């Protein structure tokens, strides 16, 4: 039972306090040691004080006990048999394992085995600042920021490990699109908070290339922002309906398996037709065509799909 509607709790930590608590080598060592012995299917993952001291390699048990005490209650739980990680503790360790707070690798431009929907040239990827950038090797792509840009999707550094460029490309799409789908549902994939969405429709759009008026090749752009942690996502209109049941069913009837978190689905979406309905209270119509049949969606100013018309 929840008795607080504001997301807080009597023992909730302020952000500054949380940073302070984990900003110490011994404390990070404790969290990692508890994670190392953790077995997801074990009935008891608690580690005794003496074993924990040995695993961390602490020489001063008094100092170690001080740091363990600071973690206990929020990041670490004390049980009858020892100490174990809490959910916030797992969050910290998994962020470290993923490499998002400890590594910042760079992958130079590498060709992958897919082609640009606009010109048919080979797509290349780069990786920097936690983002996989996919670009056309020849044309201007769909966004102007980096030249030839098709998309820029996040992937933690751990997602690069042991994968070929093609596998990185596929993993990036799968990882990011599934996270984006929670944004469509109004839930932030970073913190679970609520998401505000707005649609912008270009008033003077030129779809022959990257429009100078709006800075993209897309007539409509949806922007999602978490009201709590400020995690944000910007996407063209096709992405907003790519997992809509009517769309998946439409393609299925035509023998096409439309899985939104794939490059094939992205390429289909890039070919759908946008029509402006209004810019005062922004709205647009998106038309999908396949084998002589069509499916149309109307999207309003806050991203709601208000009409589906076959």
Image (tube, rainbow, N blue to C red):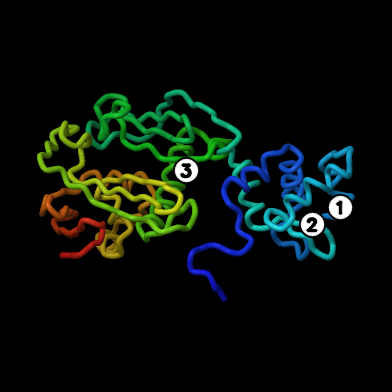
Rendered position, 110 above or below 200: above
Q: Position of residue 219 (x, y in %)?
A: 17, 44
Q: Earlier in the sequence, mark 1 or mark 2?
A: 1
Q: Earlier in the sequence, mark 1 or mark 3?
A: 1
Q: Quadrant of the N terminus?
A: bottom right
**Secondary structure of residue under mark 1:** helix
The answer for how far apart the CA atoms under marks 1 and 2 are is 7 Å
Q: Is residue 62 above or below residue 254?
A: above
Q: Is residue 160 above or below residue 84?
A: above
Q: Using residue 94 as the reference point, say whether residue 6 is left or right of it.
A: left
Q: Name the residue beneath numbered marker 2.
A: 83
The answer to the question of whether label 1 and label 3 lie on touching residues, with beta carbons closer than 8 A, is no
**Picture disc at residue 171:** 3
Q: Tell me what residue is drawn at x 34 percent, y 37 percent.
A: 151
**Residue at 75% from the left image edge and 41% from the top image edge:** 29
Q: Residue at x 42, y 47 (%)?
A: 231
**Residue 199: x and y, percent?**
23, 51
* Mark 2 surroundings within 10 Å by alpha-carbon count, few (fewer than 14), some (14 through 19), many (20 or more): many
Marks 2 and 1: in contact by CB < 8 Å? yes
Q: Is residue 44 left or right of residue 62?
A: left
Visible in this render: residue 159?
A: yes
SS for dot 2:
strand
Query: Which mark, by number, is residue 49?
Result: 1
Looking at the rendered image, the quarter that the C terminus falls into is bottom left
**Rounded to the nearest whole Å, what is the CA distance between mark 2 and mark 3?**
35 Å
Instruction: Report helix, strand or loop for mark 3.
Output: helix
């Amino acid at each position: 039972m929840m008795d607080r509607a504001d997301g807080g709790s009597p023992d909730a930590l302020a952000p500054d306090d949380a940073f302070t608590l984990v900003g110490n080598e011994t404390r990070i060592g404790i969290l990692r040691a508890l994670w190392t012995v953790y077995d997801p299917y074990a009935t008891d993952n608690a580690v005794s004080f003496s074993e924990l001291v040995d695993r961390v390699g602490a020489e001063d048990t008094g100092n170690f006990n001080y740091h363990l005490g600071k973690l206990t209650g929020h990041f670490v739980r004390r049980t009858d048999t020892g100490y174990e990680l809490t959910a916030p503790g797992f969050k910290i360790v998994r962020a470290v394992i993923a490499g998002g707070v400890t590594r910042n690798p760079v992958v130079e431009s590498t060709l992958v085995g897919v082609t640009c929907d606009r010109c048919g040239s080979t797509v290349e990827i780069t990786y920097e600042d936690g983002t996989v950038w996919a670009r056309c090797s020849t044309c201007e792509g769909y966004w102007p920021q980096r030249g030839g840009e098709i998309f820029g999707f996040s992937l933690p550094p751990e997602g690069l490990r042991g994968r070929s460029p093609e596998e990185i490309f596929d993993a990036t799409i799968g990882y990011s699109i599934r996270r984006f789908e929670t944004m469509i549902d109004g839930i932030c994939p970073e913190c679970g908070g609520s998401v505000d969405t707005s649609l912008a429709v270009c008033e003077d759009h030129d779809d022959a290339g990257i429009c100078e008026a709006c800075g993209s090749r897309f007539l409509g752009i949806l922007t999602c922002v978490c009201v709590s942690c400020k995690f944000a996502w910007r996407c063209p209109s096709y992405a907003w309906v790519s997992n809509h049941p009517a769309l998946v069913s439409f393609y299925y009837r035509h023998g096409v398996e439309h899985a939104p978190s794939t490059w094939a689905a992205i390429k289909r979406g890039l070919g759908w037709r946008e029509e402006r309905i209004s810019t005062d209270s922004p709205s647009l119509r998106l038309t999908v065509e396949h084998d002589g049949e069509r499916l149309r969606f109307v999207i309003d100013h806050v991203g709601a799909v208000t009409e589906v018309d076959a």
